[in-house]
């Protein structure tokens, strides 16, 4: 065994443990006896593609073992079943492989490898064609006298050489010229065009665009013409708007306090917008536009009791409110039918949910269904006939499905379900309430269309764009003749288009961020790996453009929530960091949503423990693949991601060289004491998923970074909004104070007019410039 430093005399008998040759060998002896395949085998063993428990490198390779190795070498989906990955990537076509138990032939290997590195072409008809291409591009060498040996069985030594040759070919095609450094402002400025929708009569389009550095609402005639600003917000971005016949109402908060108020737009850019809910400390939002009622909408607010939300009718002209339904204290959501009648209510403490129903508004609410602990039932909308509702639920299953529930009988019909991920929502015609399709998120957001006419239209529109673009429906007319589509991908912030399906004409409405050139952005790659206890962990790896993926500086970016997930698409933070030369790792650790009930529950009371291990395992996986430079790994996260950042530098202090905590939790006890009053109905969920301050005092002390600040030695930069209602400023103050007591310098940025994350663009510019400087100082040996 190599571990005992014994010399190997016969090359043919060398096992794959040849990876770590004894240092006791002299260099001369090593040079004379080094087998031709050794360097290639070493690379595969080091990255975990081949196990040292295998037999001789000259042993023949079974097809199954080859496919497993190919998935590990050519993809980042190391946690998935290899057959699924091979099928998804279409490396093997019907009839090409007879049995996974057979020893694989040389030509079969070459055909799959050529497909894996994206060099297949239409001229390849036979195995010999693939062999000739393999020789031409340098995958293999011929045997002389025109012999290709296409039917020879492949051994591990040959396999390793073919794989490393393929990697060299891939790397040779990377244009390593430096990428243009994009100004920070280009990534984080207020979007130029966002959130288009059609007016109820179809004559106008509304959308967000900047004015005075804030997101405001504009309208433009649908058939073309000049855009007109109709709102005048200078202090904060408008976060949402809605059409009320020919008027616009919208929502915004005050300095990040998340107490959103409802406003009526001035509609001409001159008249002052009218605040309709001018109540300090109150959160209000609209529920139903009440079609056919000219001046009134249904809205909800916590004016009477900050802990709960009652339903009111709001006159948008006078601002007068009339209570329609008083919350008895346990209702967390309301739902109107197609006629605007309030007929459904839900209570949910995060552990169990109850759905209450009434036939008429004059009736009392009665219990319709109750979930078991850990189950969910989330109503989406009433069906067209107002006698059924559509909902997402995981009752009696692991992954959430779309169901149709008959209100009179309680009978449920499954509309769409999957075994791999939750089905998250439905696609509807908002005018007719017809269900047109369903949405789910695997490695990317995907849609299943039930309406053939719509499916044909989507296919036609998709054909007008690059195949990597994702098409989203923002709005549509009742008759399917007019559509607003959003089109973008991981490198493109996207654009909006107006489509006439009768004329088959499409017109660009606006780019989200025209200052971003997709050609300078980096690809976001779906990944998966196994955690130390065997869970499959999914995520994304973004490699800096024009860089060979080898010993790169890395930023680990855990998401917030934590009951959320990262998704594929354009992410300004990720692209900013990649543009500065960092690889970015995003991990959907256990507890993340979208992967089923069991995966969420696997994160219960695992803050700082197995949830953190999943992130650490991802970092170690990157190091093992040779992608990450173990001396230049940073971590940055916001909210729960900020907690994971602090936990990372507290409980794995040698792993990270720099850390940025953005409004993160440092003390779980104080977090639970300072949650917003309207979250108090969810306290049971926090106690179940995070920990009970009384019953789990030892656990919460163990995993709260502030109590272990003596372990922190990683350079830290903390940023916080003074008005944060979710993660109180005290969370950041505590960790900064604890480190200062130890005379450890911490960079600390506080913005007095911000809340849970910075919204005003001047504050975002300031934050990301400071982050860039901080990471450059600690992670980059040369200026990017």
Image (cartoon, rainbow, N blue to C red):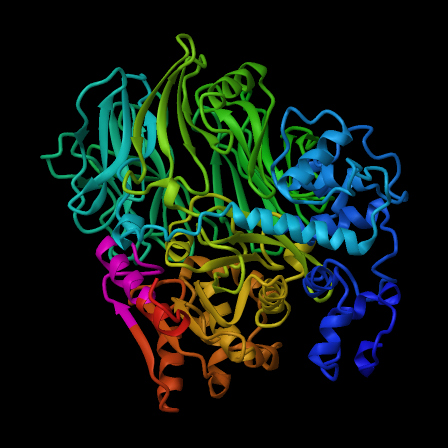
Q: Is residue 235 magenta?
A: no
Asked whether, in this view, residue 224 is left or right of residue 340, the answer is: left
Residue at the limit of the structure toward the left, as seen here: 270
Q: Camera-side residue: 497 or 780?
A: 780
Asked whether the viewer can see residue 289, the reply is no
Q: Is residue 771 magenta?
A: yes
Residue located 55% across and 81% down the image:
701
Q: Position of residue 461 (x, y in %)?
A: 46, 20
Residue located 48% across and 61% down the image:
557
Asked whether, in this view, residue 637 is left or right of residue 272, the answer is: right
Residue at the limit of the structure toward the top, as seen here: 503
Quadrant where the N terminus is found in the figure: bottom right
Q: Position of residue 116 (x, y in %)?
A: 66, 41
Q: Camera-side residue: 602 or 171?
A: 171
Tally of marks: 0
Residue located 36% across and 60% down the image:
756
Toward which corner of the image does residue 45 lie, by quadrant? Answer: bottom right
Asked whether the viewer can see residue 54, the reply is yes
Instruction: Report the span colored magenta.
Output: 749-772
Q: Position of residue 521 (x, y in %)?
A: 40, 46
**Whether residue 487 is situated above or below residue 237 in the rendered picture:** above
Residue located 17% across and 40% down the image:
274
Toward which corner of the image does residue 739 lie, by quadrant? Answer: bottom left
Q: Camera-side residue: 530 or 30?
A: 30
Quadrant where the C terminus is found in the figure: bottom left
**Whether residue 155 is situated above or below residue 780 in the rendered picture:** above
Residue at the limit of the structure toward the bottom, as seen here: 742
Asked whether, in this view, residue 105 is left or right of residue 37, the answer is: right
Q: Position of residue 649 (x, y in %)?
A: 50, 76
């Amino acid at each position: 065994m190599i571990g005992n430093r014994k010399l190997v005399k016969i090359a043919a008998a060398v096992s794959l443990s040849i990876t770590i040759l004894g240092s006791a060998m002299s260099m001369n002896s090593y040079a004379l006896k080094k087998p031709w395949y050794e360097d290639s085998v070493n690379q595969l063993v080091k990255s975990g593609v081949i196990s040292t428990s295998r037999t001789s490198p000259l042993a023949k390779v079974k097809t199954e073992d080859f496919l497993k190795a190919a998935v590990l070498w050519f993809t980042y989906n190391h946690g998935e079943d290899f057959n699924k990955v091979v099928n998804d990537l279409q490396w093997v076509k019907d009839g090409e492989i007879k049995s996974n138990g057979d020893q694989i032939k040389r030509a079969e290997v070459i055909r799959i490898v050529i497909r894996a590195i994206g060099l297949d072409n239409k001229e390849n008809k036979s195995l010999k064609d693939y062999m000739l291409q393999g020789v031409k591009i340098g995958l293999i060498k011929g045997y002389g006298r025109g012999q290709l040996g296409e039917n020879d069985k492949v051994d591990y030594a040959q396999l390793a050489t073919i794989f490393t040759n393929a990697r060299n070919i891939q790397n040779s095609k990377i244009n390593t010229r430096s990428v243009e450094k994009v100004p920070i402002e280009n990534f984080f400025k207020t979007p130029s065009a966002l959130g288009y929708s059609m007016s109820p009569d179809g004559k106008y389009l509304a959308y967000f665009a900047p004015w005075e550095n804030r997101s405001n609402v504009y309208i433009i005639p649908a058939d073309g013409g000049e855009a007109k600003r109709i709102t005048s917000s200078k202090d904060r971005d408008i976060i949402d708007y809605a059409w009320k016949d020919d008027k616009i109402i919208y929502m915004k908060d005050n300095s990040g306090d998340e107490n959103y108020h409802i406003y009526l737009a001035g509609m001409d850019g001159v008249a002052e917008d009218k605040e309709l809910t001018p109540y300090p400390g109150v959160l209000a939002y609209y529920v139903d536009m009440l079609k056919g009622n000219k001046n009134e909408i249904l809205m909800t607010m916590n004016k009477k009791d900050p802990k709960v939300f009652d339903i009111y009718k709001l006159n948008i002209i006078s601002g007068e409110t009339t209570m329609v339904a008083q919350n008895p204290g346990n209702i967390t959501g309301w739902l109107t039918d197609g006629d605007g009648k309030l007929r459904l209510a839900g209570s949910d403490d995060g552990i169990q949910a109850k759905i209450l129903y009434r036939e008429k508004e004059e009736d009392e609410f009665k219990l319709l269904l109750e979930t078991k602990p850990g189950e969910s039932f989330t109503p989406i909308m009433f069906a067209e006939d107002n006698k059924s509702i559509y909902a997402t639920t995981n009752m009696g299953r692991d992954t959430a499905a779309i169901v149709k529930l008959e209100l009179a009988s309680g009978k449920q019909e499954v509309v769409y379900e999957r075994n791999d991920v939750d089905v998250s929502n439905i696609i509807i015609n908002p005018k007719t309430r017809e269900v047109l399709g369903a949405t789910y998120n695997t490695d990317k957001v995907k849609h299943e269309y039930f309406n053939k006419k719509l499916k044909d239209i989507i296919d036609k529109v998709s054909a007008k764009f690059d195949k990597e673009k994702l098409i989203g429906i923002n709005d549509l007319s009742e008759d399917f003749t007019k559509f607003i589509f959003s089109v973008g991908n991981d490198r493109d912030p996207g654009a909006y288009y107006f489509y006439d399906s009768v004329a088959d004409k499409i017109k660009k409405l606006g780019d989200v961020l025209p200052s971003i050139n997709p050609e300078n952005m980096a690809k976001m790659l779906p990944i998966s790996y196994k955690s130390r206890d065997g869970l499959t962990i999914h995520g994304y790896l973004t490699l800096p453009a024009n860089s060979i993926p080898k010993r790169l500086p890395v930023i680990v970016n855990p998401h917030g929530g934590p009951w959320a997930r990262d998704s594929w698409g354009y992410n300004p933070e990720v692209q900013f960091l990649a543009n500065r030369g960092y690889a970015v790792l995003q991990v959907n650790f256990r507890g993340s949503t979208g992967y089923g009930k069991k995966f969420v529950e696997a994160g219960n009371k695992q803050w700082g423990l197995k949830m953190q291990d999943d992130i650490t395992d991802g970092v170690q996986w990157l190091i093992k693949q040779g992608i990450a430079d173990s001396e230049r790994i940073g971590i940055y996260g916001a909210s729960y991601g900020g907690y994971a950042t602090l936990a990372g530098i507290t409980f794995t202090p040698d792993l990270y060289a720099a850390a940025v905590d953005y409004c993160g939790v440092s003390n779980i006890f104080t977090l639970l004491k300072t949650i917003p009053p309207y979250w108090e109905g969810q306290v049971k969920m926090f106690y179940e998923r995070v920990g009970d301050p009384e019953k789990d005092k030892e656990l919460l002390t163990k995993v709260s970074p502030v109590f272990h600040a003596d372990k922190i030695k990683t350079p830290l930069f903390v940023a916080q909004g003074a008005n944060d209602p979710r993660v109180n400023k005290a969370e950041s103050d505590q960790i900064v104070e604890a480190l200062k007591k130890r005379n450890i310098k911490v960079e600390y940025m506080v913005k007095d007019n911000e809340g849970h994350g910075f919204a005003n663009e001047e504050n975002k510019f300031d934050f990301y410039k400071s982050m860039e400087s901080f990471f450059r100082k600690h992670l980059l040996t040369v200026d990017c």
